[in-house]
Image (cartoon, rainbow, N blue to C red):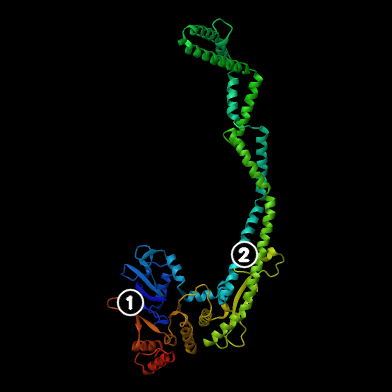
Amino acid sequence: MLAELAIDDLVLIAAARLELSPGLNVISGETGAGKTLLAQAVGLLLGQKGGEELIRPGARRALVQALFTSGDETLAVARELPRGGRSRALMNGLLSSAAAVEETLRVRLAFYGQLEHTRLLQLERQLDLLDGFAAAEVGPLVTTYADAYRRAHELVRALDELRGAGREREREIDMLRFQIGEIEAAAVEPGEDVRLAQERERARHAGKLLERTGGALALLSGEGEHAALDALRVAQRLVSEAAATDTGLGLLATRLDALAAEADDVAAELRAYVEGLDIDPARRDALELRYDKLTVLMRKYGSSADEVLAYAEDARRRLAALESAAADEGELAAEAAAAQQAALAAAAALGETRRRLAPEFARRVTDELADLAMPHATFEVRLTARGKGAATPEERFAALGPRGGDEVEFFFSANPGVPPRPLRDTASGGELSRVMLAIRGMVTIGDDVETLIFDEVDAGIGGVTAAALGERLARLAERRQIVCITHLPQVAAHAERQFAIVKRSDPVAATTETVVARVEGGERLAELCRMLGAAADDEAARQHAQGLLERAGRA
């Protein structure tokens, strides 16, 4: 629960400390005294924006702090608005973000002001309230539907994208087929660019190469008397003969034999090279053409023959994937249709449950309104199926919304003989407040929290209705902590703890300050008298105030 609320230098409040009770707490004060500042303070903790206009004149910053307790656990949160700087949020003394503080508080308290009354008129909020009436039963159905709806939408979107990409896909298929055909027609071989470059250079300089290598071959093994290979063989024979006499020459003879063999191998390779040199102009032209063709392919598809071949392989894989898209489209269409059917079935189950619960929900609200001094009020919940007249499953699915296949609207009449009309068209401010309170007293809407704060819930209410409202708030406070900002003495009398807000002005010093203080005993009687419109020493008013406290069990 909210154990303590502290406010420093917020607009006209210099310092206020409110130690709250677990049950019903009321905050009262004259119009213009600053009751809404307390609501504003809570709003700041819940992440509402605030600027320097909220800082009390002369102060360097405004600060709102709250202490929550739950069993042995405590949580301290704060929101600071410094003058000339950015606001700061703190949680348990550590810097935090306003969003994180808000998320933490949303599971602990719910704030209901005029904004919440306005939200009650929104059809989406009315659907929330109906679902919250039996959250344990409806919640799983809502989750099942939401998952099915999201899945179906994802598949339908993917199918639309696949179909929308048809033309682009066909263009890409044509391009890939051309590219693959061009590479395949060229019959590119791995490493061909390197090999072809070498052959091209050899053909270009065949004459020079023939002259050089042919000359070397002639020196090694020519028919002249100075052939190096013949001289080596003679030298080897002579040294071998000498080694027969002097064995120390054997090693030299062996080395000369190896030299002769190596020279013979070199001569053989040179002979093969010379014989392989092609100085035919036609061959040279063919090499140039092939090289030019491969160069064109490498400019398009890669910097080497190997990269060109890799591109072709990638293109084949991409082409296969695109050509199978038609089959994929059929499979995806079947999957999307099945998902749509699942969403429609989930929507039907959810709608059936809502229709079964709606009459009981309406009856309970009507009974609550009777307890709030509206004995003749009529309250109805009407559900309308979305997409009436849709013929195909696709059309019926298209008519669904994120919350299901139902549109929910509350109908209301405060007077007998008057047919119910949409709540947004008929309810006055006070009637709307009571409808909201009647619903909120029995509905869980994802914020089943320990603390409820009501601001202006008594707008437009007075007399017997005010007494009924006080009793209703007191009963609600038996299950959770209630903080209510009110101007009604009939409501305030039911509070376990009451705080009064007073605005004090000093014309001489030209200052105005709002003070918040707990009132007890005689001070509370005096505050109730003021709320009744009488002076604190008015005996009749004091008796009336005492009677209110006694009837509420707070005397």
235 displayed left or right of 331 = left
Residue 142 lies, in percent from the top left, at: 59, 70
Q: Is residue 131 visible?
A: no
- Name the one closer to the observer, 64 or 316: 316
| Quarter location, residue 426 | bottom right
Amino acid tagged 2: Ala
Query: Mark 1 or mark 2, which is nearer the start of the sequence?
Result: 2
| Quarter location, residue 346 | bottom right
222 displayed left or right of 452 = right
Residue 287 lies, in percent from the top left, at: 63, 24
**Which residue, given by chain and number where applicable, does mark 2 sit on?**
148
364 displayed left or right of 539 = right
What residue sits 66% from the left and 32% below the top? Answer: 186
Q: Is residue 104 visible?
A: yes
What residue sits 52% from the left and 75% below the top? Answer: 118
- Name the one closer to the observer, 499 or 59: 499
- Name the one closer to the observer, 274 or 330: 274
492 displayed left or right of 296 = left
> What separation in Å lies between label 2 and label 1 (alpha carbons)?
57 Å
What residue sits 60% from the left and 33% below the top? Answer: 305
The local crowd at label 2, few if under 14, some if 14 to 19, many if 20 or more residues have their Cα within 10 Å, is many
Amino acid tagged 1: Glu
Which structural element holds mark 2? helix
Q: What label does residue 513 carry, if any?
A: 1
Residue 278 lies, in percent from the top left, at: 63, 18
Decide: is 54 above or below 31.
Answer: above
Which structural element holds mark 1? strand
